[in-house]
Image (cartoon, rainbow, N blue to C red):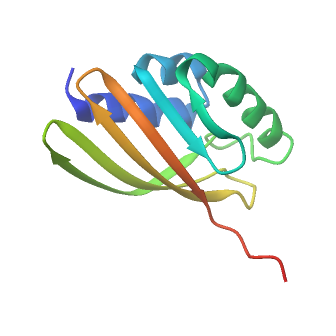
Amino acid sequence: MENAEYLGIYARGWTEGNLNILLQSMADEYVIDDPNAGRISKANFSSYFTAFKDQMDPMRDKHRPFMEIGEVLTQEAEGVLTAWAWWSVPGTPIQGSGLIKVGNKGVLSERLAFYTKLPE
């Protein structure tokens, strides 16, 4: 499978809020770096994703996708596809960006940044 295909599957998993699709797109060494939850490995991703989804569900617009992803920029070098994307959870103020790395065995990592106001 091509790197871009893994990225597409990963994005679909997030937009649908589908854990199984997300796990299928990930390489064994996958890690997500969330400033709120820390570094989460693929082995611990199910718990992380379930907690995130449980936190979003009461607030989000359930008539829309779980997550919307846009403004995707990609660059491929030395066999690694790097993607930057803007994401939001419809119906909530939760949004931010993700820097995603994809290799020939799936998504390797994502580093999240949340868009929020600083405390006054």
> Where does residue 21 sit, x and y in percent of width and height?
49, 20
Please report the residue visible at 50 percent of the width from the left and 19 percent of the height from the top. Answer: 23
Please report the residue visible at 34 percent of the width from the left and 41 percent of the height from the top. Answer: 101
Q: What number of labels is visible?
A: 0
Locate residue 9: give its quadrant: top left
| Observer-nearest of 31 and 114 | 31
> Where does residue 19 sit, x and y in percent of width and height?
59, 21
Please report the residue visible at 50 percent of the width from the left and 48 percent of the height from the top. Answer: 111
Compared across the picture, whether 69 is left or right of 114 comes to left
Q: Residue furthest bottom?
A: 120
* Looking at the image, residue 16 lies above or below residue 64: above
> Where does residue 77 sit, x and y in percent of width and height?
15, 46
Quarter of the image that includes the N terminus: top left
Quarter of the image that includes the C terminus: bottom right
Compared across the picture, whether 62 is left or right of 41 comes to right
Please report the residue visible at 55 percent of the width from the left and 16 percent of the height from the top. Answer: 20
> Where does residue 3 sit, x and y in percent of width and height?
24, 31
